[in-house]
Image (spheres, coloured by chain):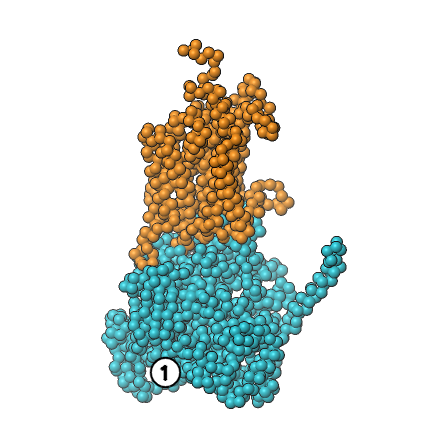
Amino acid sequence: MTDNGFRRRDFFKVLAAGGAATAVAACADPPEKLIPYLVPPSNIEFTPGVPVEYATTCAECPAACGMVIKTREARAIKAEGNPDHPVNRGTLCIRGQSSLQTLYNPARIASAMRRQAEAWQAVTWADAEAAFLAALQGVMERKRIALITDSAMGSRGEFLDKWLAGLGASPKVVLDTLGQNAIKAAGQMVFSRAEIPQYRIDQAQLLVNFGSDFLETWLSPVRQNREFAAMHAVDDKAARKGKFVHIGPHVSLTGANADEWLNIAPGSEAEVALGLAREVFEANRRKIPGVEAGELERVLQPFGIERAAGHSGIDAERLKALAKAIASAEPSLVLAGGTPAATGNAAGLQVAVNLLNYVAGNLGKTVVFGANQRIDPSSPHADVLALINRMRNGEIDLLIVDGANPLYALPPAAGMAEALGKVKTVVSLSSAWDETTHAAHLVLPGLTFLERWGDAFPQTGVYGLMQPVMAPVFPVKAAEDTLLSVAATLGMAGLKETPTYQDYLKAAWAKVQSQTGQRGDFAAFWRTALQNGGVFQQVTFSGSVRLNLRGLEVPAAPPAFEGEGLVLLPTASLRHRDGRGANKPWLQEIPDPISQVVWGSWADINPETAKRLGIRHGERIKVSSPYGEVETAAYLHYGVHPDVIAIPMGQGHSRSGRHADDVGVNVMTLLPAHTDAAGGDLALLATRVAVKGTGQQAQLVQTDGSPRQMDRGIIQSMTLAQVAKGEPPAAAHGGEHGEGAARRNFFYPQREQTPGYYDPYRWGMTVDSDRCTGCSACVAACYAENNVPVVGRERVALGREMSWIRVERFLEGAGDSYRTLVQPMFCQHCENAGCEPVCPVYATYHNPEGLNAQIYNRCVGTRYCSNNCAYKVRRFNWFEYLHDAPLHLQLNPDVTVRSKGVMEKCTMCVQRITRAKDKARSEGRIVHDGEITPACVQTCPTSALTFGNLRDPGSEVSRKAQREEGAHRVRQYEVLADLQNRPAVTYLRKVTLEDGHKEA
Amino acid sequence: MSSVTYADVNADMLRTLVRPKPAYYLLLVGFVIAFGIGALSWAIQIDVGLGLSGISHPVGWGVYITNFVFWIGIGHAGTLISAVFFLTRAPWRAPVYRAAEAMTVFAVMTAGLFPLIHVGRVWLAYWLIPYPNQRMLWVNFKSPLLWDVFAVSTYLTISVTFFVVGLVPDLAAMRDNAKGIRKLIYWQLALGWNNSYQQWLHYARGYLLLAALATPLVFSVHSIVSWDFAMSLIPGWHTTIFAPYFVAGAIFSGLAMVLTICIPLRTVFGLEKYITHHVMQSLAKVILFTSIIVGYAYTTEFFIAYYSGVPYERGLFYFRPFGEIGDGSPFFHKGDFGVPNFAFWIMVFCNVISPLPLWRFKIRNNVIALFIISVLINVGMWFERFNIVVSSLQRDFNPANWGSYHPTIVEFGITLGSFGMFFTLFTAFIRAMPSMAIAEVKEGLEPPRRNPAAHH
């Protein structure tokens, strides 16, 4: 044994030393004292196997939802909504769910870096900070220092201002290409209130939406999803539901949820809104005070329905009917926003919508000023362009880039690339590599919002706190702390006494304490705030605003579009928003719910237009504007105006990490850098593009098998009249072959009569298709909770995506009156399952609680179960799927990571069931209704999903499912009930206002 | 065969066993290389994962299961000829049954590999065998896949037994003529056969019993294989017609393979005297008969799909021949045609149309025509299984799940390897064993007389 030169004792020495080194490295002191969510501080140190939760605030978009991060063994493993938070009430959207991949992003920068020519070199933090300091001190004229950031959320904006002022530098620029400045500008013009009012969607009887994607990215999508469901989903008892009319040249997820779609010409929104306003004004004139009426008369005088019809291409009668509905609704709500509204006249549209809301009597009812949705403010686009101009003129010597990615996000026509080249030193404080950081000279990487301190004030009375939920993944420093460290060295007045951003925040929150009228010890207040995720107050708003139209000129004329061809509409992406989420594998792999496209870009083209241009679905097309050219896939979509081509934003990165780079195209490269002068936002709808087919097939990966459901009743719908009568649709598949019929015809004894089964639990779910908007948050939640691997574009193209839950989408009808149906589909946990009897080794079996259990260890991989599953919800591990470091840190230790060659599928989050049962058992009881929420149910912003015990007649799921024999079922059905698989999941039919069932 | 004598038989048979021409080795090397490609492909697939195949979601079974059913089908002719035709006293079986039996054994061996090739974790495939174990785990007797395990292993056992028993008298003949190591091997395999009256008496009874035992297997094995599909609820699989349809198809393809193999064999080794036109005519008639059954089954499937009114069945049976039904929209095209649609039409042409000329005596008597038709039938029967396996999975209940399937190079490699393995074994067999049953062929001849002329 000694011959090989390595003795047993040596081995132990090395082992011990190595082990100790590893242990010491892992035990490095966390930089902060972490206060867990609702757990006494004496329990801060975790118990292995027991999750610890921390409340924080989501910074994935400016909406600032409250979050609770579940950590295990000091690693964040799951993001959930904070149930106490008034904005999102415990739910999250797809991007919020994916925030863990911001934290564990493979493109994160692990240490300070300095660029030598084209090569990046890691440098020590001290050296980097010294270099940063030297760079700052090297700029004699401090005005020649500028900072561009992507977030001024909460106290951060003020902090950056203070820091820059202390330095004497130029004011900060907050970059968001999806800014909301126009709403504020219009509020100022019409009501002298420069704020974003609270839109109370849930209070509206009629919702009219000019283009905004309020279920996807606009303002506060999670809240809006919830409120939309409250307004739009059927109330079974009263057989009542609100109506949603979508007006705009494009249908994305939001428009797909509409009851009616007015396919107007691009840019004609303001005309239509003013035409409607005029008509509603005429109808409601009596109710409007004289002075205001006079003003309105003057302002609205030039407009009218006929004129609106002329501009929009919509029949005047239809617009009249809509105006009548708006006038008579109690109340209605008109929204405008999103990219279709982001024309050079965005403010004009907002003014028009304000007027329309005013004449419809919605002010104070559904449009409430004073609540002040403080969506993270972004700088007017003119400021961004001014900064670029200064850079280009050599007036900036040092640019600090803090999270923003202007090189990617801005149209190249804005000249950022050239301008950046003129800046002597570019210092990036971003946490991950992106195009702009690659162009920097020095990187002092920041931390993600899950590792640092911060706050957000999404609306009056709501103060959200952000705290580190775990020790930083990489030994780097929060951008705020880097800036404070510099401030201390420079002896910056007002900041040099503040050692860390946490201290700064505490000082800021002392003010919050007094504002919210909470007395007593600050330390106690602070701790409670941290535990709860902030301070949430019920504030009542006076809400009264006065119309102020003096001298108002309404610029209604449809904006001009440059060039020839189709109008280019960049659309905000549900998954990547403006491109921030592009390097998160989950967001690439989860299909866009409407197009069902993954890992790439596409261009929505109206089939008529495509026919005219001779373009096929899936063909590679050249889209060229005066500013640039891209090649992408043609996607034939009824939901787009024939004069429009719509390309989603957020793809086409070049240096943002391997999951984002070279995926799709960046639509911004086609745009001019125009600004809406009155509103202040970037004009996204500004140019026409030439579209040419190439004859080649594009790489377009869609996960839908067929756009049509072939009358098979997968997603069923019925009319409101039928709900009122309490009659299920006669022709529906569930009708004659439904649960009741299946039971009568069933030959074998039921499981519930079999000893050992379903006592006391039979787990089941309901899916309310009328509530489901298709937002796909459930899919992301499932990926996060269940360690579902991401497989990449090529494999998804072969149908090998691993998602346990998917949002199915079917189209009905054709042309402008087409309809989109969406619904989540996952393992139905059938009582009489197809998968169970065919497995030769009992790797899948029916467990006593009604779960269709899958035993990975036992599976040999015949795939017969998947073949025989009518719902095709089983997923096979075709390869050994790896989770790129450091993404693997997110893996949920409660769930097996599956290996090559085994089948997997939805377990209804059996790990959560087991945990709750353990708890109940130790307390000597059975599990309460609502104690268990699978990840998908937990995050659903519209509460479309319910989970519970079907054997408990009082449980919510039982009440919704109406499964017992002879129950009166109206909306309930089981998918493919005629196969008698007897699923444990009951679906509730979507409800339409009219009989819109058209199958082409 | 009246002109053929016992001596001719001995000489002709032994000629196939002496040192062959270089062409033989060339052929053998080719088959071994094909086999090697298959083995390598499989090894890589085991290492990297089943994802190397084109099988995916929703098409969880593809070329591998197609090959499995195909080879099992090929494996039916041997037992049919040796057992069923033995019991029904069809004397023309004698010259071809040995080759057919060998074909059966090798085909079932090849087929038996495919379930292993297609499972995700082949290293655990022994879990499909119910053996006592300390983990208290048992197999699921409800699963048709488990029935398959029993059906195929039983069939292999019986076929091998039948094959070996049939060989014994001939092996003894070989033993008597061989030298050196060969003699030792033949001596072992001949089990002490000494051609005594007693031995022949027992042998004949034993052979009869084995034939009776094997006969039900001809029908049961492929019925069970068909239940792999019929027991599921997938449209296009879930049908009661499958068992007879599969058995007829198996006999059809098996006999075609017998022709495909025997026609070159007879030409190369000059066995025209034994494998006569009469033998081939008889085979062709059975092929024609089973072709009609198979054609009838195809038609019935369509009729039932229509008559049942089940939308899933109707949808699938529209899709198989015609492609997408379409909806008039520009993204869901009517008549979009894919691999399974081509598979369907290849199947119809090869299995229903191409055997029709066999109605004519002239065609049945034409060796080249027979050979071409038999090869076409083999191709057609492969595509029949492909069509059943793949197209049904492509278009099942929920249109959101619909998908497609494109075999990959690994699947081609493994399929090639399966042919390589089969033909390697068969080619080696021709050299090592008498490919015609000497004893039985002699039974059909006039016994040798001291003075044949005096008789007339």
One can see residue A86 in this view:
no
Tell me: residue A110, above or below residue A132.
above
Q: Nearer the viewer, residue A927 or A486?
A: A486
* Residue at left offset 69%, top offset 64%: A19
Q: Residue B179 or A143: which is nearer the viewer?
A: B179
Rendered residue at 37%/70% (across/down): A629
Give coordinates of residue A275: x percent, y percent.
28, 77
Protein chain holding label 1: A
- Left or right placement of residue B92 versus residue B45 in this view: left
Does B3 sit above or below residue B318?
Answer: above
Crowd rating for badge 1 (residues with CA inside 10 Å; few <14, some 14–19, many 20+): some
Question: In the figure, A267 relative to B33: above or below?
Answer: below
Q: Is residue A599 visible?
A: yes
Q: Please tell me the colour of chain A.
A: cyan
Residue flagged by tag 1: what amino acid is it?
Ala
Kindly identify which residue carries mark 1.
A677
Q: Colour of chain B?
A: orange
